[in-house]
Image (cartoon, grey):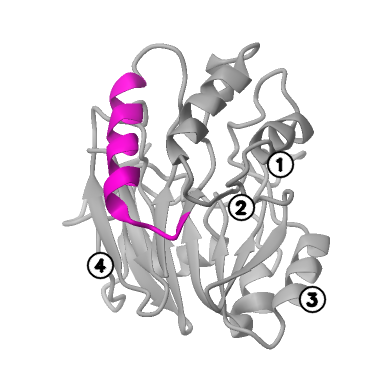
Amino acid sequence: MRILLIADVHNKPHGSKKSLNSINNIIKKSKSDLIVFMGDTVHGPSTPYNYEKYLRQVFDLTGDVPFATVFGNHDDECSTSKEDILKITKSYKNCLTVGCDYVIEMFDETLLFIDSGSYYNGEESFYDTVKKEQIDFAKSKIKGKKAILFQHIIMPDIMECIEEYGKMVKGAVRDGERFYKFKNNIEYTGTLGERPCPPDINTGEFEELREYLKACVFGHDHKNSFELYIRGVKFIQCAGSGNNSYDKFCKSSVKILDTKTLETERIFI
């Protein structure tokens, strides 16, 4: 099964035409069985009152190819609620999205979709956490299987692979006054272009689900395209697909995932 992964399109007024044209061409050429939009399809703060227009500009490109979605932290930063966004999304005949958290069985694959939320209601974390009830729901749906998980914000467990420094070292990326790179014993492919931005609280999602997972796919961190294994599960990070997503600093891209081999092809747009 071939899945086209499109993360962080950030569609909005002005500057999105190049992204839409590029994504349209890739959808036509990729011959994918499924498209997954990895969140932040529309930049909510830039489209407070006309969200539907910019969401449909993206989803119209899918044609007859089945697609599924997860929410990003910017999607509902507008006057449109998640419930209304889901109504728009599910109005497409080729849409497989069921809700915020759901499972699709397709081509002998179990695909798990989780809403990683937006911002935490408190001082303990900046980004939101995946809640216990979501973890319990996921476990009940995929127990005994080997699923592929899709969610916007990467799990906090990625930080066990990252070393933090107070000064610049070879291969590190800067975040404020601190510097970050993969630990020397970590094998990975792709690039670390910025510090990963998971929630600051670990609610145990990975530990609870990992025996039922073979891969986890994330968006959110526009400059990162790395892939690595953490305790037997492949983490696949997708960089931003929209030319509004840090395009001054990194070239936008999509990935095509082969679910049998878990290999990906990165395509720059």
Identify the disc placed on residue 129. Answer: none
Q: Amino acid at mark 1?
A: Tyr
Q: Which residue is mark 1?
A: 120
Numbered disc in front, either 1 or 3:
3
**Earlier along the polypeptide chain: callout 2 or callout 4?**
4
Residue range corresponding to the magenta coloring: 16-34
Considering the numbered disc 4 on the image, is that residue within a helix, a strand or a loop?
A: loop
- Can you tell which mark lies on residue 189? 4
Q: Is disc 2 surrounded by few (<14), some (14 to 19) or many (20+) residues within 10 Å?
A: some
Give the foreground label among 1 and 2: 1
First in residue order: circle 2 vs circle 3: 3
**Which residue was labeled with disc 2?**
200
Residue 38 makes an appearance in the image: yes
Q: Nearer the viewer, residue 195 or 90?
A: 90
Residue 166 among magenta residues:
no
In space, the residues marked 2 and 4 are separated at their CA atoms by: 25 Å
Q: Is residue 8 visible?
A: no
